[in-house]
Structure formats: structure tokens, C-alpha cells
């Protein structure tokens, strides 16, 4: 089984404010995405930046075989949302944007407006194979580090504004990480030693970032540490990031202003991580991903074929 996550980058049909300008550019984007999915050959793939459900179905129509599709009903103000493609039957078990009960709304801009829920929903599904326990998987797309400012600007008026809006983005991403961890707790039910649970998606920060670390649960026993093979009481609720299994030369999923970053992640429960045979980014046979370098203005890539992210995947034995 290959389990993966991929940000499809602005998957919209043509003619709208965010999609390609024409059918030719749209067809080129779909063809590029379909070629990667076909070569990657995932069993379950979490996807992000689905701008229109119809566009995802257009993509599925270019793939071989039958695919199950699930999409979150919680989209952001541009309509983008998360979802799943699966070769196996799936059932939606959660679709939520709610912050944990005790977490208060966080400041979102200079006006004092607050965010009381995640900008994009968290979707969890249960997948059943012919044998073995069910697999529960949650997909997410946390708040981006790419900043936007009032009046549609992507550049700040001054460094004070940049710092404030960077803080607002961090507040939101942190709250969203806490909400996602709460969903993970529900899926694990305190029994990660015997349950197959995965949390994956575009976390918009790297493995050692505080927001990413929130998702792991109890510290200790990380991959590559002496305690990994030693059972302890944290195993029941802990999640393991498969990033250390990715070959160092491939350990990135986006290139931001020339900097290679691993911001898309797959986290596994105790039972599941011990089935991990290999992990990587991009296509397994191609080595380091060949990605464009993006800048602070996402509008620059409107209508470009493919995606500015590489898939991140883990192969389970």
C-alpha cells in the first residue's frame, strides 16, 4: 500500500478568477497532474487546493481504473478544500473546521477580526482493505506562511505590517494544528498500538516547526532515535513523522525563493509506522523532485501546468 499527500495547486476549471485562462491551459494542467498520479500509483492520496469539486472529477476522469473521491465541505474564501482519492472503498468519519472547545478565537488582521475555526476543513475517512483492520486517515491544509495583506496586496507597506501579519498567520496555523491534533486523538482513541491511523497534508511548515511538533503528541521515540524500538506508554497516543525515512537529497516538497522546504507531511500511528518500508517525495523512480521556485505572489503561477508541490508518500508493508 502506498499512502500519500499532494497539494494540487489551485485546481479550478478555466474562466474563473483563480483558474487557468482557457481550456488549453486547463487541459495541460490536468494532464500533468494525471501523469504524476498514474506513475505514483497511490492506494490512498490526500489532496489539497481543490478549488472546484468538478475539477477534481475532471482529473479522476483522466485516470485509469475506478477511484473513490471524498471532499471536505469546509472550503476557504477562495473555495479551496481538501479531499481524498482512493482505490479502496472509503467512508467519511469526520469533516470539521472547529477549534478545540477550550481554544479561543485568534486575531486574524489589523482590524481586530478573529478566526474561530480553521480556514480549511479537516477531512477524515476510514478505508477498508480485504484483510486487516480499517485504516483511518485525516487530511489537512494548514494556514500558509505566504502572507496576504489588506486590499489584496502580497507586499506589506512596511516591516511592521509584515511582522504583524506573519504573527497572525502563525496564530492561525498554531490553532489549526491544535484542532488537527484533537481530531487525531479521536481517530486514535488512545489505542495507537492497535489502530492504523495516519494524519497527512500540507502543514505549511517543516518537521521541526512548533506547529508541526504539536501534532506528534507525547515526545520521545521519534524515528532515528535510540528509543524508537523501545515501547513506552506514549505509544498509544503518539504520531510519527516519516520525514526521517525520506532520503536527504529528496527531503523537500516545495522550493520557496530558492530554499528547499519539506512542508507536506505524513504522520503515522505506532502500529502503522512499524509497517513503513520506505518514504519519499516526488515519484519513486525519479530521485529529487524537479520543482519551480515560487515567490511571495501566488498569482504569478495562475494557469501553470502541474503543481508547485511534490507528492509526499510512504510505502507500507
Image: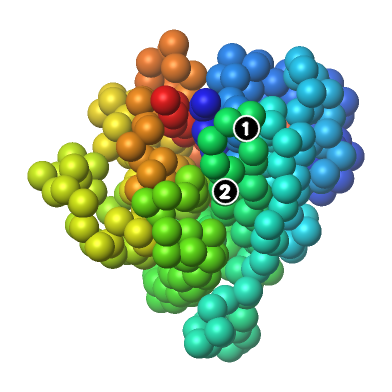
Q: For mark 2, give the secondary structure.
A: strand
Relative vertical location of residue 246 with respect to residue 297 in this rendering, above or below: above
Asked whether the beta carbons under mark 2 and mark 1 sit within 8 Å of each other, the answer is: no
Q: For mark 1, give the secondary structure.
A: loop
Q: Nearer the viewer, residue 96 or 11?
A: 96
The residue carrying pointer 1 sits among few (fewer than 14), some (14 to 19) or many (20 or more) residues within 10 Å by Cα, namely: few
Relative vertical location of residue 236 with respect to residue 99 in this rendering, above or below: above
Q: Residue at horizontal 65%, vertical 49%?
A: 125
- Mark toward the start of the polypeptide (2 vs 1): 1
> Which label sits in the foreground, 2 or 1?
1
Q: Is residue 9 left or right of residue 214?
A: right
The residue identified by callout 1 is 129
Q: Nearer the viewer, residue 182 or 103?
A: 182
Q: Residue furthest top?
A: 285
Q: Residue at horizontal 38%, vertical 33%?
A: 275
Residue 136 bears which disc, if any?
A: 2
Residue 146: x %, y % from top left: 51, 55
Residue 41: x %, y % from top left: 60, 19
Q: Residue at horizontal 65%, vertical 17%?
A: 38
Q: Quadrant of the C terminus?
A: top left
Q: Is residue 294 left or right of residue 163?
A: right
- Rendered image quadrant of residue 190: bottom left
Q: Residue at horizontal 63%, vertical 74%?
A: 98
Amino acid at each position: 500500500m502506498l499512502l500519500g499527500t499532494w497539494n494540487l495547486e489551485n485546481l479550478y476549471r478555466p474562466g474563473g478568477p483563480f483558474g487557468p485562462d482557457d481550456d488549453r491551459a486547463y487541459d495541460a494542467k490536468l494532464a500533468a497532474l494525471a501523469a504524476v498520479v498514474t506513475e505514483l500509483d497511490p492506494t490512498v492520496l490526500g489532496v489539497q487546493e481543490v478549488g472546484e469539486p468538478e475539477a477534481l472529477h475532471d482529473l479522476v476522469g483522466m485516470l485509469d481504473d475506478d477511484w473513490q473521491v471524498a471532499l471536505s465541505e469546509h472550503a476557504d474564501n477562495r473555495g479551496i478544500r481538501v479531499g481524498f482519492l482512493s482505490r479502496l472503498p472509503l467512508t467519511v468519519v469526520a469533516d470539521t473546521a472547529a477549534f478545540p472547545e477550550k481554544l479561543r478565537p485568534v486575531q486574524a488582521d489589523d482590524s481586530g477580526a478573529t478566526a474561530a475555526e480553521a480556514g480549511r476543513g479537516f477531512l477524515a475517512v476510514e478505508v477498508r482493505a480485504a484483510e486487516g483492520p480499517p485504516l483511518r486517515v485525516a487530511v489537512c491544509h494548514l494556514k500558509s506562511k505566504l502572507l496576504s495583506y489588506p486590499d489584496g496586496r502580497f507586499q506589506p507597506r512596511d516591516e511592521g505590517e509584515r511582522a504583524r501579519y506573519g504573527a497572525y498567520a502563525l496564530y492561525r496555523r498554531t490553532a489549526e494544528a491544535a484542532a488537527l491534533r484533537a481530531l487525531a486523538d479521536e481517530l486514535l482513541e488512545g489505542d495507537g498500538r492497535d489502530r492504523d491511523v495516519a494524519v497527512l497534508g500540507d502543514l505549511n511548515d517543516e518537521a521541526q516547526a512548533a506547529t508541526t511538533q504539536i501534532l506528534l503528541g507525547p515526545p520521545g521515540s521519534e524515528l532515528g532515535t535510540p528509543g524508537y524500538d523501545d515501547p513506552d506508554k506514549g505509544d498509544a497516543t503518539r504520531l510519527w513523522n516519516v520525514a526521517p525515512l525520506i532520503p536527504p537529497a529528496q527531503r523537500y516538497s516545495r522550493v520557496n525563493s530558492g530554499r528547499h522546504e519539506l512542508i507536506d507531511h505524513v504522520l503515522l500511528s505506532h502500529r502503522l509506522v512499524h509497517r513503513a518500508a520506505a518514504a519519499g517525495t516526488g515519484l519513486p523512480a525519479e530521485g529529487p523532485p524537479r520543482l519551480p521556485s515560487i515567490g511571495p505572489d501566488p498569482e504569478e503561477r495562475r494557469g501553470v501546468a502541474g503543481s508547485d508541490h511534490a507528492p509526499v508518500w510512504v510505502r507500507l508493508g
